[in-house]
Amino acid sequence: MIRKCLFPVAGYGTRFLPATKSMPKEMLPVVNKPLVQYGVEEALEAGLTEIGFVTGRGKRAIADHFDVSYELEHQIAGSAKEKYLTSVRDVMAKGSFSFTRQSEMRGLGDAILTGRRLMGDEAFGVVLSDDLCVCEEEGVLAQMANLYKQFRCSIIAVQEVPEEVIHKFGVIDGEQIKDNIYQINHMVEKPDAKDAPSNLAIIGRYILTPDIFEIIESTPPGKNDELQLTDALLTQAKSGCVLAYKFKGRRFDCGSVAGFVEATNYVYENIYTHE
Ligand code: G1P
């Protein structure tokens, strides 16, 4: 059973300036709920209740969001407005929340390594909350946690993407071993379209076995001179097994303004409970 989930949330959110000048990008609301809460709800649904955040400067609002606000609770207790707190109260009741800080941003691999103490020596999930995933039945992490029970190795969520956007992603190559499941034999971080080994792009959901930490430690900086999780996972794939899973569901790129607006419209039309 996987119990823990890591959220790297130290990034600046430059593309959303000035909104993100003093507010973490993860707290931007998609309709009425901060982006990061969607990811946390997905983790909780998958049974991953020990949530760890790798934060940075200017991210205190995230910790406050998952803590009690006494003034607010006091003010609206017993009033008709209490219903607005239901979802976040539910999240707080189900999960436990821990925080650690990344002092310098040296890439996703480094962010994951910073979360080592929080995750310990067991397999754990990773959510990049910029990727908002909506699924008809089980969430992406729940789908992946089920696969983990069967395969007991690191698993990466992937999705087919068009050639013109492939350079924005980590891209995998692998041998299909079952419907929607590939054993990875190659992967590259953000290749030029002409060098991409396939059209299967990595989406921000992972299950990682804990040996990944030592592998990251011995991984040199890669694309953009950053420590890339993709490079460490390739090493893990070569020495053992890493699977890619083409998940059932839809992903919105909330790291871009266009994707964020698309997600907002989708959630407003399909998920948000209108009064
Ligand atoms: C990260 C990963 C990349 C992956 C992407 C998914 O990149 O490094 O492999 O495809 O997330 O969102 P980022 O978008 O954080 O630069």
Image (spheres, rainbow, N blue to C red):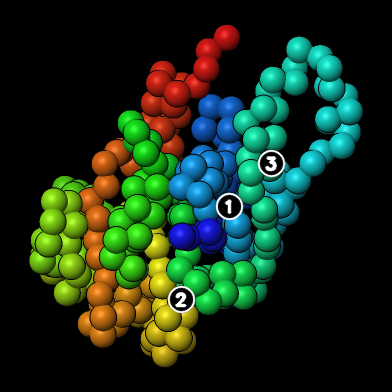
Q: Residue at x 17, y 62 (%)?
A: 182
Q: Amino acid at mark 2?
A: Pro
Q: Secondary structure at mark 3?
A: helix
Front-lying residue, 127 or 17 = 127
Q: Position of residue 197 (x, y in %)?
A: 13, 67
- Label 3 CA crowd tier, 10 Å (few <14, some 14–19, many 20+): few
Say which residue label 2 marks.
210
Whichever of labels 1 and 3 marks the residue nearer the N terminus, that label is: 1
Residue drawn at 52 percent across, 32 percent down: 30
Which dot marks residue 93? 3
* Residue 165 place in picture, x, y as percent: 23, 51
Foreground residue, 18 or 271?
A: 271
- Report the Cα–Cα distance between label 1 and label 3: 10 Å
| Amino acid on which the number 3 mark rests in the picture | Ala
Local SS, label 2: loop
Q: Is residue 110 visible?
A: no
Q: Is residue 220 above or below residue 114?
A: below
Q: How far apart in space, not on screen, are marks 2 and 3 (Cα)?
A: 27 Å
Examine the image and state in which quarter residue 252 appears. top left
Does residue 144 appear to the left or right of 90 in the view shown?
left
Looking at the image, residue 152 sits to the left or right of residue 29; the answer is: left
Q: Residues within 10 Å of mark 2 (few under 14, many from 20)?
A: some
Whether residue 78 is visible, yes or no, is: yes
- Residue 266 position in % (x across, y down): 39, 26
Q: Is mark 1 within 8 Å of ligand 1?
A: no
**Residue under label 1:** 49
Label of residue 274 in the image: none
The disc, 2 or 3, on the residue closer to the chain's N-terminal end is: 3
Spot occupied by residue 257 in the image (x, y as percentages of width and height): 43, 40
Quadrant where the image shows the C terminus: top right
Identify which residue is drawn at 34% across, 48% down.
Answer: 143
